[in-house]
Structure formats: C-alpha cells, structure tokens
Image (spheres, grey):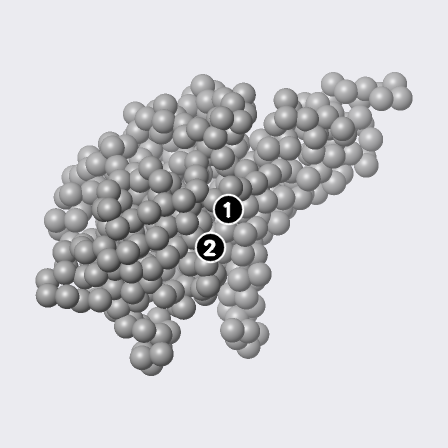
Amino acid sequence: MSFEPTAEQALVRSTAESIAAEYGPAYWREKEAEGAFAADFWDELAEADFHGLLVPEEYGGAGMGLAEMGVAMETLCAEGCGMAGTWYLVLTAGMAALGIREHGADDQQGRYLPDIAAGDRNFSIAITEPEAGTNTLNVATRAEHDGNEYVLNGRKAWITFSDIADNMILVTRTTPRDEVERGTDGISLFVVDMADPGIETSPIPKHAINYSNSCEVVIEDVRVPEENLLGQEGDGWWVLVDMLNPERVGFAAAATGIGELAARSAIEYANDREVFGAPIGTHQAVSFPLTEAYARMETARLMRKKAEWLFDRGEDCAYETNVAKATAVDAGIETVKHAMQAFGGWGYATEYDVERWWREINLTRLAPVTQQMAYNHIAREIGFPRSY
C-alpha cells in the first residue's frame, strides 16, 4: 500500500477543491435555512464525473474505486461543504452504484448505471425500520412472490432522498425471520420505482442537514417484476454488506473532513482573536485540546485508507471499515467540539458556521451504524464473546 496519491486521486482532490470553493459555507448556511435541496451542487458533481466515480467506463463512469470516492468526499467536506460533501454522494454514487455494479443483472446495469454516472438518476436506500432499528435482520417489510411479480408491503424510516429519488433499493424479507435457520437468510433487495402510487413519503423534522429530507416511507401493495430483484432471492444480506462497508467509509471521510474544516476555521480565528494582549491560540488550553483531537483524526484517516485499499482489491474489510468509522467519528466530534470552544460565544452564532458543523457531525455517531454497534463488531473481532 502506497501513501503517495495516484494521478487519479490528485485530480479528484483538485476537482473537489474547485467545487467546494464555489459551494462554500455561506451557500450551505443558506440551503440549511431554506430547507432546500441543492440541485445546482448535485449537477456540479455530475459535471465533474463524481457521480460516476465507481461506475465502469463502459457505462459512462470514471471506473475508479472507493479510494478515489473517499478522497472526493473528505475533500469536499473539508474545503467548505461540510456534511454535504458526503451526503450528496454516499447513497446514489456510492451504495446504489456499487450494489448494481457488483450484483445487478446485465439489464439492470445497462438501465441504471449510465444514468447514475450522468447524475440523471437519484437513489434512496431503504433499510431502517421503526421497530427493527439497527438490527437489519429483523426487517419486517415483506416481498411475496405472485406469478412473475413480487408484492411489497412495509414501512421504513429515516430514508434520505426518498421524497425526490427516482428509485429506491428496498430491503425486504422474502422469508420471515422465524422460518430461516440463520438470520441472514431470507433477505432480498429490490429496485423500486418511486413514482409507484403505492409509495408514500413523509419528511421527518430533524436537527440538521436540512438541505435534504429524511423520510418515513410506506410501501403498500407495490408490485415489481422479478427482474427488479437485485442479486438472488434470499441472499440479499450479502449484497447489502457490500453496500454498507462503503457507507461506513463515507461517514469516516465525512467525520475527518468536517473536523478538518472546523479546525482550520478555529485555528484562523485563534491566530487573529486577541484577549489579554495576545492571540488566544498562544494559550495551550486552547491549542492543545484541538491539536490532540486533530492528531487522532490523522490516525483514523490511515485506517480509512486501508479499508478503501482492501475494498478496491475485493478483500474483506468489515473490521477495517468499522474501526475507521468509529475512530474517525470519535476524533472528528472532539475536533469540532474544541473548535467551537475556541470561538467562545461566537461558536454559537450561525455566521461562523461551526455550530452547524457541530450539528452535522453528531449524526455520524448515530449513522450509518451507531458507535456502539461499530465497537460491538470490533470487540468480537479482537476476541470478545458476541454481545448480540
């Protein structure tokens, strides 16, 4: 594994820096206040081929890997976009593109991947349910075979982009949990058209990231043809795993990216703001907490890069993605907390943006998997007995 950026990664980074310079903190402050989807930013990402980073060249994509996607997300976040740098890429360009690339039938790849690469198709990923929560094996959304179709019924929660998406990858059970030997059996994924009249979405009021909605989704008697099955019936868990590892990488990139953004802002302020006759940055009570958290972010970045490296080589990376996510989030949250403290009372003011970054980064300890569940996985891998 080399630490020298490839030519492709250097290009992705410079392109992300240019985009972030155009869509900086003031832009996202406005979008957050309006509760408006940033369609022009979405289109700019498409123009830069970022939606197609993981799409093979034969389908109009860039044919790159998760390492390049990690660079794009972290750089966008760090250079001024905050959480939006990951948020607008992780579902469609990350999870959906990978799921269809790796497990989609030829006709599914031909139908969806070119549109994803062009930025013309937006996906939501419907996993979470009100009762199942983090325990995806307990999803209750059903898919029942009826002739050459499946009939879908269920309810999902916290499904981002579902109110504006063209399609949804829906996680269901084709066999109930109590009828399978292993909990991972009997799960099936489907590509669903969001224009179906049997689908209703209702935005959930939330604490931050209001430049896109996360919704409750009700699916009632939605019929899809057999060819909408993604992967094999009953084996959808393994399709989902291939999609979830990159999602953890994306949130790790978001955590260090937002942490970097907040740290830079706080350091600049600490160099300029004078109290008691000296810049506040000269006081170690200000500089040391932020420096310590920043150093922890640097180490978390290394594990994320290892996870990306393993994923792009088709090797198992579940342990590495969980370590990367857990450590990046802990370090990123500490960094933003101390950055906010460096601003003193002004850290609470919207005009300095750090309060928004604080609200945004705190989502990463809850999603795409809670810190507790990430540490559960790590604990099992290093030898502790299973906790669930």
From this viewpoint, which residue is outermost toward the right?
276
- In the rendered view, does 231 fall on the left or right side of 365? left
* Residue 133 shows up from this direction: yes
Report how many numbered discs are placed on residues in the image.
Answer: 2
Is residue 198 depicted above or below 177 in this figure?
above
Mark nearer the N terminus (1 vs 2): 1
Residue 101: x %, y % from top left: 24, 49
SS state under label 2: helix
- In the rendered view, does 134 fall on the left or right side of 286? left
Give the labeled residue for mark 1: 252
From this viewpoint, which residue is outermost toward the left?
148
Give the labeled residue for mark 2: 321
Viewer-proximal residue, 34 or 60? 34
* Residue 378 shows up from this direction: no
Dot 2, how many residues are within 10 Å of its Cα: few (below 14), some (14-19), or many (20+)?
many
Which residue: 26% across, 50% down?
Answer: 198
Residue 203: x %, y % from top left: 43, 42
Residue 147: x %, y % from top left: 10, 65
Which residue: 14% across, 60% down?
Answer: 149
Which residue: 63% across, 22% down?
Answer: 351
Which residue: 21% across, 61% down?
Answer: 151
Check if mark 1's residue and mark 2's residue have beta carbons within 8 Å: yes
- In the rendered view, does 156 fall on the left or right side of 382? left
SS state under label 1: helix
Is residue 252 depicted above or below 152 in this figure?
above
State which quadrant residue 37 falls in: top left
Q: CA distance from mark 1 to mark 2?
A: 8 Å
State which quadrant residue 65 falls in: top left
Q: Amino acid at mark 1?
A: Ala
